Image (tube, rainbow, N blue to C red):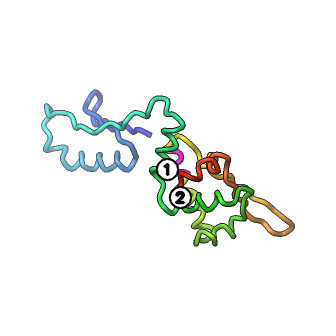
Amino acid sequence: MAIKVQWEADGPFAICDSAAEAVELLKQARSINRAIPKNAAPLEVPMPQAPRANPTRTDNLSEFFGSINERSKKLLAELAKHPEGVDGDAFAKVCNTDGPGLGGILGGISKHAKKAHMTIGHWVQSEMRVEGIHRFRWITPTKLLLEQKDRIL
């Protein structure tokens, strides 16, 4: 979300990408405000790039596979070996992690998917299941993941 920082009405301003960046900019402005003459040129802040117009599916897939790390690729490749799905706890052990670690990797995949104009749901389906007193997470690869499994590694 873009945040506009403006020092005076009709005065110079900057567009920041995050609240932290805006706060830092304001701190810097306070510390040097007295040293800046009134007729000084406005502070230049690089503008964020505009999103691609109508990205294609191939663009999205290339961006996604180019951005995820090796651990994420390994998880997706391993999940593709279980087209019927797998218990999350057992799958975490196969991936040499625990439940929260598996969630962290899936969270990272989700962030990279979002940057590639996709969602985690394009790659992985996850649901809670209950069988008697046993409650567990069931993870299933999607059709897209099964189609693209050769591109993963």
Do callouts 1 and 2 mark residues in contact (Cβ within 8 Å)?
yes
Q: Residue at x 53, y 59 (%)?
A: 72
Where does the image place residue 25, in percent across and percent down from the top left?
Answer: 29, 46
Q: Residue at x 35, y 41 (%)?
A: 16
Q: Secondary structure at mark 2?
A: helix
Where does the image place residue 97, in percent across and percent down from the top left?
Answer: 58, 71
Which residue is the site of mark 1? 65
Q: In the picture, residue 118 is in which quadrant?
A: top right
Front residue of this view, candidates 53 and 42: 53
Q: Residue at x 51, y 63 (%)?
A: 71
Q: In the picture, residue 87 is in which quadrant?
A: bottom right
Rendered position, 79 above or below 55 = below
Q: Is residue 61 left or right of residue 48?
A: right
Residue 134 lies in the magenta-colored region = no
Which residue is the site of mark 2? 73
Where does the image place residue 27, in percent across and percent down from the top left?
Answer: 28, 50
